[in-house]
Image (cartoon, rainbow, N blue to C red):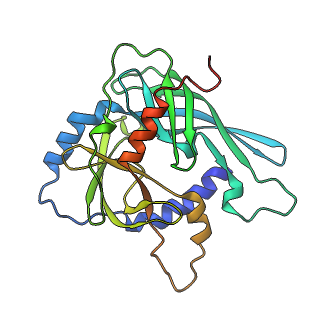
């Protein structure tokens, strides 16, 4: 098991018992059907090779993540942790020894209802927002995508839904999961605290609400909660949709990283 997975797995296991939403809808079937009809084609899988360098030794592993098409010409939104990860943010490093660093390359995207893995390149990343953008090299025609400019504001008490795509082991099919906005914070910057799973969050009508992800550094620092079992910090963060949309609009204007 790699260093990255050793770090991420405990955080996910801590969150797992809490991932549920208040059942304010009597029947989720229409919501699932609407989300799949509107956005399933835009939810895709990305594979990449992550190189982890630690004390001069390099380990290369193939990994995957969820991605969302956010333009008709192949711009993709992915979590920044799938592109680059600096382990110094997690603390606990040996004095005088450099912290491990992980960087990804060889991005490949499989569109919905396709068996072909298409090459993609990194465009840019925003470490503060925890987001990154890839671009397909040669998209075949216009693609289905999520229009982030048509978002809806999230606030504490809001129920949202995340749409994901399973691995080949489960047939690469779309699945969804409800989540709940638990609160909000302005430390260190404005974020919503949520109970859910990573990825783009939607209203029950299919409007994007924000991007949910794990703050790995915060999870690492708080995992030794002790016998007091203070669970208040065991939440994921949601970046509001207006910030995601604005950053995506800027990314759409950029060439691929290192390109002309």
The location of residue 109, given as percent across then percent down, is 47, 27
Where 215 falls versus 223 (above or below)? Answer: above
Residue 239 in view here: yes
Task: Residue at 41% x, 40% y: name it.
Answer: 246
- Outermost residue toward the bottom in this view: 228
Q: Is residue 260 left or right of residue 73?
A: right
The location of residue 114, given as percent across then percent down, is 37, 22
Task: Residue at 73% x, 40% y: name it.
Answer: 59
- Outermost residue toward the right in this view: 96
Residue 45 in view here: no
Q: Quadrant of residue 155?
A: bottom left
Q: Quadrant of residue 156?
A: bottom left
Task: Residue at 24% x, 38% y: name it.
Answer: 36
Q: Is residue 196 left or right of residue 254?
A: left
Of residues 242 and 169, the one drawn nearer to the viewer in this rendering: 242
Where 13 falls versus 58 (above or below)? Answer: below
Task: Residue at 67% x, 58% y: name it.
Answer: 89
Of residues 203 and 11, the one drawn nearer to the viewer in this rendering: 203
Q: Quadrant of residue 35?
A: top left
| Numbered-mark total | 0
Of residues 116 and 40, the one drawn nearer to the viewer in this rendering: 40
The location of residue 180, given as percent across then percent down, is 30, 62
Where 185 falls versus 66 (above or below)? Answer: below
Q: Is residue 255 left or right of residue 61?
A: left
Quarter in which the C terminus is drawn: top right
């Amino acid at each position: 098991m790699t260093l990255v997975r050793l770090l991420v797995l405990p955080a996910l296991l801590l969150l797992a018992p809490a991932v549920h939403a208040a059942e304010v809808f009597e029947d989720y079937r229409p919501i699932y059907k609407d989300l799949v009809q509107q956005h399933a084609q835009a939810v895709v899988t990305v594979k990449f090779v992550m190189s982890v360098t630690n004390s001069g030794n390099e380990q290369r592993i193939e990994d995957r993540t969820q991605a969302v098409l956010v333009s008709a010409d192949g711009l993709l939104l992915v979590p920044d942790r799938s592109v680059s990860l600096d382990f110094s943010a997690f603390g606990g490093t040996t004095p005088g020894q450099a912290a491990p660093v992980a960087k990804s390359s060889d991005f490949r995207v499989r569109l919905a209802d396709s068996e072909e893995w298409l090459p993609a390149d990194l465009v840019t990343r925003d470490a503060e927002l925890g987001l990154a953008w890839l671009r397909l090299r040669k998209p075949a025609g216009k693609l289905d995508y999520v229009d982030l400019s048509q978002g809806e504001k999230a606030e504490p008490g809001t129920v949202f839904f995340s749409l994901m795509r399973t691995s080949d082991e489960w047939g690469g099919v779309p699945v969804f999961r409800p989540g709940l906005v638990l609160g909000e914070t302005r430390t260190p910057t404005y974020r919503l605290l949520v109970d859910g799973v990573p990825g783009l969050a939607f209203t029950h009508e299919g409007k994007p609400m924000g991007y949910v992800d794990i703050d790995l550094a915060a999870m690492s620092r708080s995992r030794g909660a002790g016998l007091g079992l203070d669970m208040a910090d065991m939440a994921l963060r949601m970046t509001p949709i207006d910030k995601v949309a604005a950053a995506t609009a800027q990314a759409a204007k950029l060439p691929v990283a290192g390109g002309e």
